[in-house]
Amino acid sequence: MDFVEPRKDSNPADVPDDASVALDQLGSWKKTADCSSLGAQNIGDEVVLMGWVQRRRDHGGLIFVDLRDREGLTQVVFDPQISPDAHEHAGVLRSEFVMAVKGKVRARPEGMANPKLPTGEIEVAVTELRVLNSSKTPPFHIEDDVEASENIRLKYRYLDLRRPKLFKNLLLRHKVAQLSRGYLNDLGFIEVETPVLTRSTPEGARDYLVPSRVNSGKFYALPQSPQLFKQLLMVSGFERYYQIVKCFRDEDLRADRQPEFTQIDLEMSFISEQDVYDLIEGWIIRVFGELAGIPLSPGFPRMTYADAMDRYGSDKPDTRFELPLADVTDIVAQSEFRVFRQAVERGGIVKALRVPDGKDMSRKDLDDLIEFVKIFGAQGMAWIKIQPDGWQSPITKFLQESVQKGLAQRLGIRTGDVIFFVADQRKVVNDALGNLRVRLGQQLGMIDPDRYNFLWVTDFPLVEWDHDEKRYTAVHHPFTAPLQADMDVLEEQPQKVRSRAYDLVLNGTEIGGGSIRIHQRETQRRVFNMLGISDEEAQEKFGFLLEALQYGAPPHGGVAFGLDRLVMLLSKSPSIRDVIAFPKTQKATCLMTSAPSDADVNQLLELCIKVEGDRRK
RNA sequence: GGGGUGGUAGUUAAGUUGGUUAUAACGCCGGCCUGUCACGCCGGAGGCCGAGGGUUCAAGUCCCUUCCACCCCGCCA
């Protein structure tokens, strides 16, 4: 027995400290049950339980302790009539002390059952107590109703993870990973690990760089995804590959984005889009059915990118509610409202969103919504209230009768509606109204939280124009196959070329995406050229891929899913941090380990790296 | 890089037009208590008001700078 000074304190607040409690050894005791499993059927059993003190209720003559382990809570009782020693020893117990008890399961007295606890019918009458460790007073209570701020929780992450909710999230994550492995294994997929230390590639996100000691001055990059490796495995003839793998992107964080995250990544040879859809739907149906009790049917709906943008202003529309956008550019182009006319003259568009029964919106509500769309780049937003006695709006006087008639017809306007208009470049209009649509859907209670609407979004454009870099960039990535039908305009009208990429969207969140890849060298060369990547640059950066494509690369394609986001949705968590054991803050630091940190001078010397300080200052 | 919210006891929060000793709840410590389960009762301790500077007779409160957490835009599939 380690014996250190007993607690004799007058008061130091910090007192429950290792140094003040006599501790026992675990000895040969083994847990015989967990804290959720005992019930009336166990009455009379001799058991050994181990765990943490959730709460102690000391009645002087009788001490109750709620004992917690990862499975649940069980009440244990220290009764001097059963064991005076144990009762006396229990006096030292405090929150989060680690204890082992031996005792007998007994029914609680008449009327004393606790219906709130699964084990509330019984209690364990302790014959012997071993205090395995003490605990400082924790900075927050270990319970599901979080009452601590995020920075405290992140600093003491190991305590936060004791909360049942977080534990259950990580357990669910484990189950998703295991089910996914089983599903893919059964279908002939082979899990292959790909390098974490790899080379930087242009395009896409910023890379995390890792200096090479044995090649001083050179750097590895951490993979943004195993994209090229899995394609090369197809060239190798693996036919079906998967991996549950960490990916790294050095970009700013969001509630659903961490710089390191996990993908369920797979690739198949000799397949087309339909094979991917079938495979993934089968998998999703099992994940949601078996792990969340949510029944789904195969044949998820599909929508082209063009339709999604047109109707919902987003490439990941939430289809749990309608509230569609309508393009009214042609109607208002001739109106006397300058904002509309000028937007059209500058090559922009005008779209409208009709909110049925929006008549109760106050002027303040409308102003709030106008402020909201400004976040997305809109200069402003026009609105019209359709009142029984006519159209009420600051802009009605600029809309001549023909325009009003056209709008009424296209939008199906009815009395009581509110119509919103944004006029700007296409991207701004879709961003603003697409986001407004989602906000109104939430605000007006149009979203059923128990619905799970999956949607395949297809036919993405292959490229988009990058105004900053003055060139086309790949929407998906530069290895995505163009649609065969659009190949003849690849060089002349790149922006018109559709790709064989697809995303799976759930309730407005993209949870996975992929594509059929280019497997012929000549096609890959043409796409690189169109993206402004010269033959020389392609050779230098992707030479190994271009080379490989010349050695009998089979047609192939695949998909990758964000495991974190999937578990986040399954567990209805508000943040991705709630499904990651040790997440980073919005500034990409770890409050527990204080990473990133300064490097040791000797480490830097070995790497031939000189730190010049913050050059942005 | 930009916009927003927050930072006061261990924790969560209150703190008026600047004004005496900065409140409350929970937690913590001590005492009492044999059926509690948010146990109860009595007593007690606990503060760099995120940090730095300024205005003022006087700053938790006003001004400037800065740090941290969160949400969003940009960025990122």
Image (cartoon, coloured by chain):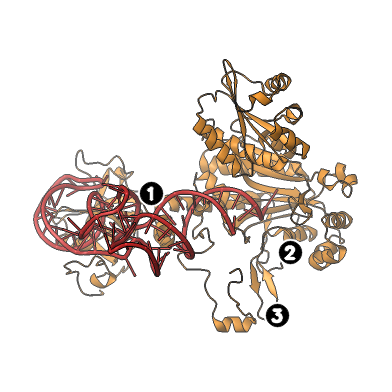
Task: Decide if residue A252 is on the left or right side of residue A365.
Answer: right
Numbered tag placed on residue A344 in the rendering: none
* Closer-to-camera residue (A121/A410): A410
Q: Are marks 2 and 3 in contact (CB under 8 Å)?
A: no
Q: Identify the residue position indicated by label 2 in the image.
A: A201
CA distance separating discs 2 and 3? 18 Å
N-term mark: 3 or 1: 1
* Closer-to-camera residue (A599/A449): A599
Q: Measuring 42% from the left and 49% from the top, which residue is drawn there?
A: A165
Residue A68 position by quadrant: bottom left
Q: Is residue A448 visible?
A: no
- Amino acid at the residue labelled 2: Thr
- Amino acid at the residue labelled 3: Asn
Task: Measuring from the top left, give residue A291's x and y in whole percent.
Answer: 52, 44
Q: Secondary structure at mark 3?
A: loop
Residue B59 position by quadrant: bottom left
Badge 3 density bin: few <14, some 14–19, many ≥20, Cα 10 Å? few
Q: Are marks 1 and 2 in contact (CB under 8 Å)?
A: no
Which chain is displayed in orange in the rendered image?
A: A
Badge 1 density bin: few <14, some 14–19, many ≥20, Cα 10 Å? few
Q: Identify the residue position indicated by label 3 in the image.
A: A215
Question: Split into 4 quadrants, where in the image is the N terminus of chain A?
Answer: bottom left
Which chain is displayed in red in the rendered image?
A: B
Task: Measuring from the top left, give residue A346's x and y in whole percent.
Answer: 77, 40
Residue A211 position by quadrant: bottom right
The nearer-to-camera label among 1 and 2 is 2
CA distance separating discs 3 and 1? 50 Å
The chain letter for the residue carrying disc 2 is: A
Residue A514's place in the image compared with A590, above or below, is above
Q: Secondary structure at mark 2?
A: loop
Q: Identify the residue position indicated by label 1 in the image.
A: A144
